[in-house]
Amino acid sequence: MLSPIRDTPVSPLAQQPRLNGLGAAPVADGSPDRRPVPATPLSRHRLLCYERWERISRGHHQVLYAQAAEEVLIQQWRRARNLEKRIRLALARGAITQGDEMEQLRRQMLTRRGSFGGRPLLDHRLEPIADRGASSPRLCRLKSVDLLSPRSRAEQIELRIGELWLSLTLPADASVQLQLSLVQRALAQCGVEALHVDGQLQFAVPDVLWQKLDGHWWMRGQGQRLPAGELRGIKLLECHHWQDPRGWGLNDIDNLRQSLPKVQGVVAKLARMLKRMRSQLELASVGVLSGEGGLAAEEIPAQLDALGRLLAPQGFHRRLTSLMAQANTSRNQTQSLLY
């Protein structure tokens, strides 16, 4: 018995799977990390051109930064030099006759620190921020707590600095050096450095953490140095580094006498930084102007020959291969079309 002939539905051409070069439909790979591989890799000459473009762009960025930093350092050096001259004049006369001018210079050194790419070039110590990657740490001390003073009984102290909880135990009748080492070991967990300066315990706090502390951190003890019970906010008093213009006293002769060595040190340091920045600018400029790129001289003939072979006409076989590649068909499919 014969079965009736049924028409087989034919899907539209656009919905049919395209054949690869072997005559079979490609297998779909649902992996999101799958990347198409280019049929022809980039030539050496093009890769070298891309590398040269990237190197020149980076060098141009370095030149712009060095130019901006050089200009700011020159201005700050001139302000510090003028301030030094006025302090010397006031000390020689024994009276402050240019107090307003000195205060204005100090305020300008604090506020006019330049910027590049939306970020300040110099920090509060007049140090280039790019050298560290961040601003210099802030110096501070506890207002009403002396952690290094010896006590007759041991005490466990808990601290909350930002989001981090710390705990340390200070032994009874311990020396200052022993207690300092214990405090340093505990605070190192949050990047804070403990220093013993002029008989006081000071802390070097990273600038990012300092902005989060809001001028205090939380502590509690066991009744020896700190009261027990709930955490209490202990105020932090900022101490100014000798390079920080905020720590320069300009209101009387005694303060001027103490501030003069600090200003002289800043003048010398700014001069050294300016010299180093000019060297960086010169190196960056030379690198941009004399950047090597492209092909070496001995590689040019071989590349030209290869390019000529690609561009030369190869007759019917070359054209047919090109058409097969464009149509994504195999040799068997092409033969069936021709014969």
Image: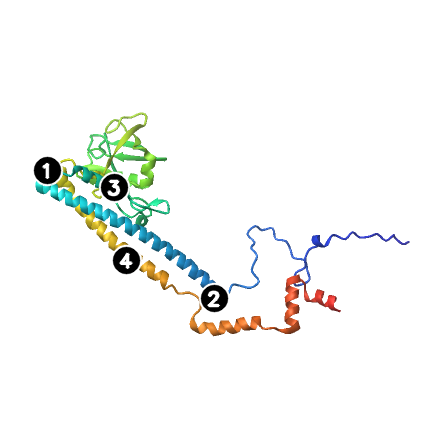
Which residue type carries mark 2? His
Are dots 3 and 4 in contact, CB under 8 Å?
A: no
Percent x, y of residue 27 = 64, 55
Which residue, as the protein is rendered here, is positioned at the far right? 1
Q: Which mark is residue 45?
A: 2
Q: Which picture quadrant has residue 205? A: top left
Which residue, as the protein is rendered here, is positioned at the far left? 93
Judging depth in this view, the residue of 98 and 298 nearest the camera is 98
Which residue type carries mark 4? Ser
Q: Which mark is residue 259?
A: none
Q: Earlier in the sequence, mark 1 or mark 2?
A: 2
Mark 3 sits on what residue?
Answer: 108
Q: Quadrant of the C terminus?
A: bottom right
Q: Is residue 195 left or right of residue 48?
A: left
Q: Nearer the viewer, mark 1 or mark 2?
A: 1
Q: Is residue 198 left or right of residue 208?
A: left
Which residue type carries mark 3? Gln
Q: Residue at x 50, y 65 (%)?
A: 43
Q: Earlier in the sequence, mark 1 or mark 4?
A: 1
Mark 4 sits on what residue?
Answer: 279
